[in-house]
Image: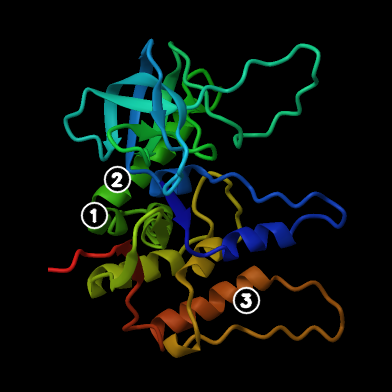
Amino acid sequence: MLRILSLAAAAVALCAAPAGAKRIAPLPGLVEKVARSEAVVVGKVTAVEKDRVMLPQYPGAKDKVAHAVAVVTVEKGLLGAGAAKEFKVAFVPPPKPDPNVPVRPVRGRGPVDLPVGLEGVFFLTAHPGGTYHAVEPDLPPLDAKAENYKGQVEVVGKAAAAVADPMAALKAGKPEDRFLAAAALVIRYRTVPNGVETEVVKVPADESRLILKGLAEGDWSRYDPNGANGSQTFYRLGLTAADGWVQPAVSNPAGAPVDFTAILKDAFGKWVDGPGKDYRVNKVVPKAPKK
């Protein structure tokens, strides 16, 4: 299971909410789902085992709760699946609805149900109880019956390819594909594993340079909830004055509209070619055991 290191991207989205609106952080887009997963597969739930297993729900939990175990048969592995033909996914079945109690749906954040017959793309992480995999509440599967399923699978495939082979993806022919690859890698590298001690290592210089250039050349003006987003990805880098980064100041005495995203992108591009030319992206990894 993973958690995001930088909350700046979520903060940007929250600040954009209308006054008086309930500020709920948006669900992760497809690129982030891939970046936060240990395995991504196209498959189908072909069985749910009869017996329940007692497992902790989160790292460090003292109590254990009953989990069902779904068998996800792999049609195609997109990331981290190796030669696996199936994955056993432990989950806490959602409670049966009470017809007398109205239910307000929580989009994508409630318990994830994995009924037999569910087919689509599954975003899997290691279960804290070991042995099994899990589906985090904000990383629900893509349903193959969804109207835009084919387009979603295409985005997922590109993000998975970037994580699997960063250098190839960062050298793609189209700038939008390089941009998506850079975003997927920044999210991947700046995500903290749960339940383990971590340390920070530097991404190799040649890869770091391509990540920064891919991000700088992207289209930041277009917000794509399922794709790469420039300003949100930028904030995940966590640049500081020690890196030579200076947050651009905005002067607007006349009260005219200001496109801060464009100003930020321009400043970042100049930083990449100037103070940031030798910058290496920080990657959070599990701490190596002492020898």
Q: Which mark is residue 263?
A: 3
Tag in front: 1 or 2: 2
Q: Name the residue at 68% across, 16% down.
A: 97
Tag in front: 2 or 3: 2
The image shows residue 107, relative to residue 88, as above or below, that is below
Residue 252 position within the rendered picture, expressed as x and y whole percent measured from the top left: 80, 83
CA gap between label 1 and label 2 equals 9 Å
Answer few, some or many: residues within 10 Å of disc 3's Cα (few below 14, many 20 plus, some between 14 and 19): some
What kind of element bears circle 2? helix
Which residue in the structure is indicated by mark 1? 168
Which residue in the structure is indicated by mark 2? 161
Answer few, some or many: residues within 10 Å of disc 2's Cα (few below 14, many 20 plus, some between 14 and 19): some
Q: What colour scheme governs how the chains and residues are painted in the rendered image of this protein?
A: rainbow
- Identify which amino acid the numbered label 1 is placed on: Ala
> Is residue 94 left or right of 22 when viewed as pictured?
left
- Identify which amino acid the numbered label 2 is placed on: Ala
Q: Are marks 1 and 2 in contact (CB under 8 Å)?
A: yes
Name the residue nearer the viewer: 141 or 163. 141
- Residue 148 in view here: yes
CA gap between label 3 and label 1 equals 30 Å
Residue 60 position within the rendered picture, expressed as x and y whole percent measured from the top left: 42, 49
